[in-house]
Image (cartoon, rainbow, N blue to C red):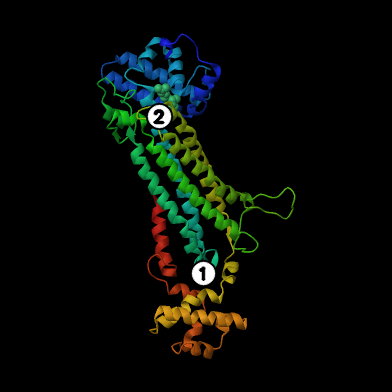
Amino acid sequence: MWGGRFDEGINALMARFNNSFPFDQRMWREDIRGSMAWARQLAEAGILSAEERDTLLAGLEAVYAEFDEGRFVAHTTDEDIHTAVERRLGEIVGSVAGKLHTGRSRNDQVATDVRLWTLGAIERINDGIRALQQALLTQAESAGNALMPGYTHLQRAQPVLVAHWLLAHFWPLQRDRERLVDCAKRAAVLPLGSGALAGTPLAIDRMALATELGMATVSPNSIDAVSDRDFIAEFLFCAALIGTHLSRLAEDMIIYSSAEFGFVVLADAYSTGSSLMPQKKNPDSFELLRGKSGRLTGHLVTMLTVLKGLPSAYNKDLQEDKEPLFDAADTLELALPVAAGAIATAQFRYDRMRAALDDAMLATDVADHLVARGVPFREAHRVVGKLVREAEQRQVTLSALPLDVFRVAHPSFGDDILQVFDGNHSVAQRCVPGATGPDAVQAQLVQARQHVLR
Ligand code: ARG
C-alpha cells in the first residue's frame, strides 16, 4: 500500500505492533459507508466516471456482505480496516479500486470512521441509560409513600421517601444522557476532505459528504481535523462518570442488601453463590458494576495521556484511541442492562426500612418545632442537642422523655411536641420542589417520567 519507496519488508514483530486490524476491524460498517460516500462525491467532482463509481459501489457492497456474513478473510498484510477493505475491493473489482483513495488519506478516513462509530455507540448507550432510568422510576412509583432512613456520612440522618432515594440515582443518569447528546454534537463534524493534513485538492462538496454521512457540519481546519480526538476524550469522560454513578448506586444496593440493613433482597438471577459457604448469596452484579468504574476511569486517563505531548496533525499514537473507546462502550453496553435488570428485579423491604427509622432522626424536626414558635434556629439546635443527650443518659428514645423535660429545656415547647415523632409528619413538612415530601416527590416522578419517554 505504501511500499513504493521501501526496499525491505516490515519486521514481523513491527508488523504485529503496527497493525490495528485486530481491533479496528469492528469499524468495517463505518469504513465502507465512508468509502461509498467518498466514491459518490469523487464522481460528482468528475474524478470517477459514473461507471467507475458504480463498479466501486458494487465492490464495496460485496465487501460489506462478506463482513456482514462473517465471510471476510483477513490477510496478514492487512494493516488496518482501511487497507483491508481496499485490498479486498481490488481483488473483487480490479485496478479501478486504486482510484477510491484519490484525494483521501487514512488520516481523514480513520477520523471519520471513529466519529461515525462513536455516534452509534452514543445512541446505544443513551438507550441503555434510559432503560436503567425506567427501572429506577418503576421502583420509585411502586414505593408509594414508604419511608426509609436517609443517610449522610452513612449515619442515620432524616427520614426520606424510598422513592426519593431511588430518584436520587435517576437524575445523575439524566445528566449523563444530556452530556452524551452534547458530546454527539462535537462528534458529528466531518473530517473527510482534510486529506493527510492539508486538505484534498479535489473539488469535493464536503457539506454534501457530511449530509450523506449524517454529520451536521464539516471541520473548519484540516490540520485540526486529523488530530482532533476531543470527542473521544469527551465520550470517555461521559463513560467514566456514568461508571461513577453506577458505582454509587451499586454501593447503596450492596450495603442495603446486607443482613445488617436488610432493606433489599436481590433476585437470584443477579446474584451468585459461594463455592465454600452454602448460605451465601452475593451481590456480584452490583459489585461488578462498582468495579467497572475503575476500568472506565482508566480509559479516560489512557486517552488523555496519549493526547498529551503530541504535536499537531496526525501521529500514529492516535491509533491508541480505539481500544479504550471500544472497551468503554462495550463495558457500558453490558453494564447498563445488567444494572437495569438488577434494579427491576430487586425486592425492597419497606417494613425493614420503616423499622430502621428512629426518634433521633427527628431531632431536626424537634428544633423546627421551636423555630416555628419564634426561637432562633441556633438556640433550638442547642436545646435539642441537650435533650438528645438527656435521652441517651436515661437510655430512652427522645419521644419517651416526659413533656416537662422538654418544657424545662425550653418553655416554648407546645403540648403537640409528640406529633413531631412521626416520619410521615417529618417528610410532609418538606414540600418545596426537590424535597422529600410526598407531593414534591409526586411532582418529581412526573418530571422524571417525561425524560424516559424521549
Ligand atoms: N490505523 C491507523 C489509526 O488507527 C489509521 C491511520 C493511519 N495513518 C497513517 N498515516 N499511517 O490511526
* Amino acid of disc 1: Ala
Q: Which mark is residue 392?
A: none
Q: Which residue is mark 1?
A: 157
Query: What kind of element bears circle 1?
Result: strand
- Few, some or many C-alpha atoms within 10 Å of disc 1 (few <14, some 14-19, many ≥20)? some
Residue plotted at (31% across, 22% down): 40
Q: Residue 186, relative to residue 365: is it above or below?
A: above
Which image quadrant: the N terminus? top left
Cα distance in 3D space between marks 1 and 2: 51 Å
Foreground residue among 389 and 405? 389
* Amino acid of disc 2: Asp
Q: Which residue is mark 2?
A: 113
Going by the image, does 99 lie left or right of 399? left
Residue plotted at (51% across, 70% down): 159
Going by the image, does 431 lie left or right of 349? left
Q: Residue furthest top?
A: 7
Residue plotted at (32% across, 14% down): 51
Query: What kind of element bears circle 2?
Result: helix
Going by the image, does 283 lie left or right of 76? right
- Few, some or many C-alpha atoms within 10 Å of disc 2 (few <14, some 14-19, many ≥20)? many
Residue 115 at x, y percent in the picture: 39, 33
